Amino acid sequence: MTELIKISEHEGQKVVSARELHSFLEVTSRFNDWITNRLAEYGFEEGLEVTKILVTISGQKAFDYALTLDAAKELSMVERNEKGKAARRYFIECEKIAQSVPAIAVPQSLPEALRAYALEVETRMAVEAKLLEAQPKVDFFDTVTQSQDEWDMAKVAKVINVGIGRNTMFKILRQKQVLNSVNNPYQRYVSAGYFRMATTTWNDPLTGVPHVNAKTVVTQKGVDFIRRTLTA
């Protein structure tokens, strides 16, 4: 697989340079403005999803950010262009390969080296086959998460299709402290843009008394957030 963006290790995590991602995505705004606005807008947590680091650029000290692959995928997706779509797919494939390739002991002899090489080739072929099989699902989530729609939780449970119903999804999201005891999202996830509280009003046809209904709707990026939360 061609390397689009360099992935390195930082404190035991696979990370991407925010500056390199900014360049690859061909963002027109200045890096400092772009990263500041994105971090504030999407509520990434310092030390968890992003880590501020000091780097040297053309002999000058400057700040960069080490982004987890999940954070890099999200930042790529919201650019809503072909570069963003390509970057997101690339990070998904890198994660799948990292999870699928087993650790191989250092060969101590030529026969061991040949067996190790054969195993690596077989593993790579199996991974590529899995990626081809999963591609329609990746295309589907590209379409879903880049749409402008907002969906209710019942529809999200069907769309994600991880073998659970709405009630089980509610239970897991409560356990992970995404939803509270009455299945409303905590404010931090609303502020991050994953959910919105939608209200509708109607008048009782008999009494004429107005009523207000409120329900949780999920944004396009919230669909992918819920999928990642359920499969983590």
Image: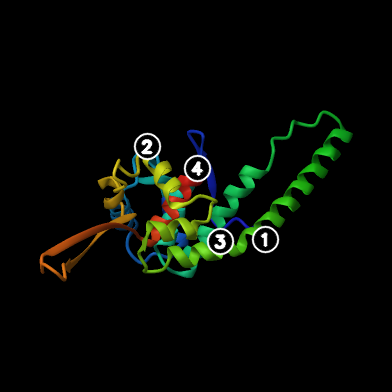
Q: How dense is the environment of label 1, judged by Cα within 10 Å: few (below 14), some, or many (20 and up)?
A: few
Q: How dense is the environment of label 4, judged by Cα within 10 Å: few (below 14), some, or many (20 and up)?
A: few
Q: Earlier in the sequence, mark 2 or mark 3?
A: 2
Q: What residue is shown with label 3?
A: 138
**1 and 2 marks in contact (CB < 8 Å):** no
Residue 31 sits in quarter:
bottom left
Q: How dense is the environment of label 3, judged by Cα within 10 Å: few (below 14), some, or many (20 and up)?
A: some
- Give the numbered dot on residue 47: 2
Q: Which amino acid is tagged 3? A: Val
Q: Which amino acid is tagged 1? A: Leu
**How far apart, in angstroms, are the residues tagged by discs 4 and 2?**
19 Å
**How far apart, in angstroms, are the residues tagged by discs 4 and 3?**
17 Å
Front position among marks 4 and 2: 4
**How far apart, in angstroms, are the residues tagged by discs 1 and 4?**
22 Å
Q: Secondary structure at mark 1?
A: helix
Front position among marks 1 and 2: 1
